[in-house]
C-alpha cells in the first residue's frame, strides 16, 4: 500500500512561483517512478512531469523551461518547482507513483492540490 500526500498549492500571480511537495509513505520500491499530473476544469488529467528513481526526467512541452521536477529518494519525496506561472497552469495538481509490473504498471495517486494563477 502506498500513500501520497501533496502540499504547496495556492494562489499566485502570473509570473510568480510555487513549489509543490509530495511525500510518499508505505511500501516504496526503488523501481518506482514519481510524477505530477494536472487537471483543469472540464479537461482530462495530463502529465506535467515525471522522474525515475535514477533521476531521468520527462516534461510536458507546455512546462519545459519553467517547471523542474526533483526527487529525494531518502525522504521518498518528489518536488515540482514551478516558475513563470501562467493562468493556463491553473489546475488541480496530483502526485503520482508508477510501479512497473511484470504485465502492467500500477498507479497510485495523491488527493490533489489546487494551483490558481490569477491577478
Image (cartoon, rainbow, N blue to C red):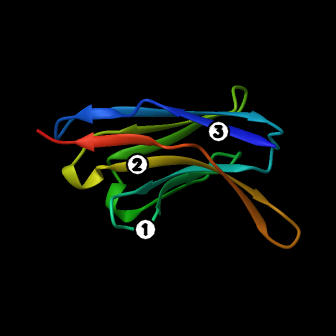
Label 2: element kind? strand
Q: CA distance from mark 3 to mark 2?
A: 15 Å
Q: CA distance from mark 2 to mark 1?
A: 11 Å
Q: Residue at x 29, y 51 (%)?
A: 89
Mark 3 or mark 1, earlier in chain: 3
Q: Is residue 42 above or below residue 117?
A: below
Image location of residue 76, percent across then percent down: 69, 32
Horizontal side of 88 relative to 76 (left or right) equals: left
Label 3: element kind? strand
Image location of residue 13, percent across then percent down: 17, 36
Q: Which residue is mark 2?
A: 92
Quarter of the figure that contains the C terminus: top left
Q: Residue at x 36, y 67 (%)?
A: 43
Foreground residue, 64 or 36? 36
Q: Residue at x 32, y 32 (%)?
A: 10
Horizontal side of 3 relative to 41 (left or right) equals: right
Foreground residue, 83 or 93? 93
Image location of residue 104, percent across then percent down: 80, 70
Q: Which residue is mark 3?
A: 4
Foreground residue, 92 or 85? 92
Q: Which residue is mark 1?
A: 44
Amino acid at each position: 500500500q502506498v500513500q501520497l500526500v501533496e502540499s504547496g498549492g495556492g494562489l499566485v500571480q502570473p509570473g510568480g512561483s510555487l513549489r509543490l511537495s509530495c511525500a510518499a509513505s508505505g511500501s516504496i520500491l526503488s523501481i518506482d517512478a514519481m510524477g505530477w499530473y494536472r487537471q483543469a476544469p472540464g479537461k482530462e488529467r495530463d502529465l506535467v512531469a515525471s522522474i525515475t528513481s535514477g533521476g531521468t526526467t520527462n516534461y510536458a512541452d507546455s512546462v519545459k523551461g519553467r517547471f523542474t521536477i526533483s526527487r529525494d529518494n531518502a525522504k521518498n519525496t518528489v518536488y515540482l518547482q514551478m516558475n513563470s506561472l501562467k493562468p493556463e497552469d491553473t489546475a488541480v495538481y496530483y502526485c503520482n507513483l508508477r510501479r512497473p509490473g511484470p504485465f502492467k504498471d500500477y498507479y497510485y495517486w495523491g488527493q490533489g492540490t489546487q494551483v490558481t494563477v490569477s491577478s
